[in-house]
Image (cartoon, coloured by chain):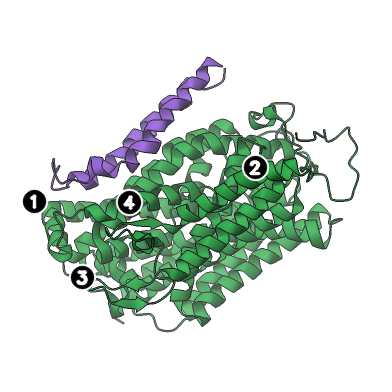
Amino acid sequence: MSRKRWYWLLVIPAVVPLLVPLYDRVDPTVYGFPFYYWGQLAFVALAMLTMTVVRVLTRRR
Amino acid sequence: MPHRVEISVFVGMFVAVAGPGLLAARWRRPASFNDLDSWGLGSRSFGPYVSWFLLGGDLYTAYTFVALPALMYGVGAAGFYAVPFAIVGYPLGFVALTRLWSVAHVHGLVTPADFVRARFGSRGLALLVAVTGIVATMPYIALQLIGVEAVLTTLGVPGKWPLAIAFAVLAIFTYHSGLRAPALIAFVKDILLGYVVLAVLLTVGMTWNAWGGVFHSAELKFHTRGPLLPASGQLGYVSLALGSALAIFLYPHAITGVLAARNRETVRRTIATLPIYTAMLGLVALLGFTAIAWGVKPVGGDHNTVLPALLHGFLPEWLAGFAYAAIGVGALVPASVMSIATANLFARNIYREYLRPAASPAAELRVSKLASLAVKLGAAGFVLLLNPQFSVDLQLIGSVVILQTLPAVGLGLYTSWFHRRALVAGLLCGLATGVALLYQTPQLAPTGRVVRAHFGGSSWSLAHLGIHNGQSIYIGLIALAVNLVVTVGLTPVLRATGVPDGLDITWKHDYEADEGDPSVRRLSELVDGGPMNPVVYEQAVPRHGQPVPPSTVDYRIRR
């Protein structure tokens, strides 16, 4: 039962990509990419990482 | 012929893919191939890899890969909304879809409307959800053809007949092999697509500060502070991303892809790793900026040809041919799954529910296969006979429309509190609001001139409320809010006035059931390598007016 609390971690990737003022900026740029673009692409990694962690922590057996 | 190499590679790849599509019916074939589960859900036997490719090909459609660079080319940073949208949807799907998978396997449900039927005990609501799903998905199929058409236009192929041939190929292998065909073809499509994206990105990235220059030229074109969203565009951006994220897994074709998975862990693993496609999609979208920087001109002013024209201008011919093939094959996968999903909705929730309740599984399958042909014929008609803009408009409406099934299908996975009549009323009010607001929205040129008076976009300007700060909000979310208010408001009223509730035949533990649990039936014979016994078709949903023996279905009157 207590394993279920790990699901709350999923709130992070569900909410962070929606906080537009957080990433609607140019700096810091990486390899020519303004933060607006590489930041949002980085949220992909954030989402995959979070879901994988939750998946492993809540696995049965 | 100016595009000889490109056309040969394109045609060659297309033919090479059609073969496996036809042979797919033999792939992991169960002993009996005569019910809807084996045709329309691939016997619910797909493991993590197949599921990943199938859902990836299903959700990230060819049209998306063509339309997003076109959008970035046309409107700039706002077109990037697809990236947060295709991230936010996954954590939500991760929890909700595993529940849907479990309850669908316990009760033998095939479509989202099946679930609504079981959960809220209402044929009418299920019919409404089914019709909504069909209406939302049909134009989406037509859009896939428009993606292929953009490629053909760039190649200078005249006439509509190549498109008709592509569709005939699609129709034949889907009819023959069911969901197995797109699952197998998705492998080919993704290998092609991944290779092409990598090649293009390397080509762009080889030049020093290439991306800096690309973003700079976008800045020059859109006159913004950096190539970014204006502050007035933020609400529209975030509401569009959120609304689309909530809608994506309500689409029948997404649910079909999920239900075909073998067990819960497959669903979870697939969803946890699918965002890789989002990264690829985001990078492809940025090619719209590359097109600006390199001075690519869309063919005949059609923005959808921006990406094909870019590929044609800057890649070696054979590689451009591969890219076109990736788009063409990429259109077949989602179009096939979508036609299967809509056909299942028709066969299960309209034909068997209303037209012929006594239909045998084999008859149901026959109807579904024919319906899949009819759906594709309809979609082809859309593209070939009507103005393509009509399909784009309908798809715009479609995403607003499908979002209105969220209370019944999405929230229904967590609660059965809603009254069935309240859900019907909410859904209808949401649909009406959505269509009315879309009708109210004009399409504006960058200069502010009205290009078209109606159905010009999905962002509703706050100026309608007297707030003149340039902000807008996604119409789907407004309609959803109306929908929820009506549903939540009417439920207690209906209960208080004694309108009877529907029967909920699902139990709490049904939503957690997994492969191997005694309640999950029809799985042992489907797992790879297991004995292939004839699949026994079980009907868990009680038919209208037909008493169901208590030994097979437990009744619970909802309080």
Q: Quadrant of the C terminus of chain B?
A: top right
Q: Which residue is mark 3?
A: B296
What is the x, y in percent for residue B442? 38, 72
Q: Which residue is at a point 41% across and 25% down the rendered structure image? A: A53
What's the residue type where badge 2 is placed? Arg
Q: Which residue is mark 1?
A: B208
Task: Indicate which disc residue B272 carries.
Answer: none
Q: Which residue is at a point 48% across and 43% down the rendered structure image? A: B52
Task: Indicate which disc residue B44 carries.
Answer: 2
What's the residue type where badge 1 is placed? Trp
Colour in which chain A is shown? purple
- Contact? badges 4 and 2 (CB < 8 Å): no
Give the camera-side residue of B558 and B226: B558
Q: Quadrant of residue B302?
A: bottom left
Q: Are marks 1 and 2 on the same chain?
A: yes
Marks 1/3: CA distance? 20 Å
Secondary structure beneath dot 1 equals: loop
* Letter of the chain shown green in the rendering: B
Label 1: few (<14), some or many (≥20) within 10 Å? few
Marks 1/4: CA distance? 35 Å
Marks 1/2: CA distance? 49 Å
Q: Which residue is at a point 38% across and 77% down the rendered structure image? A: B452
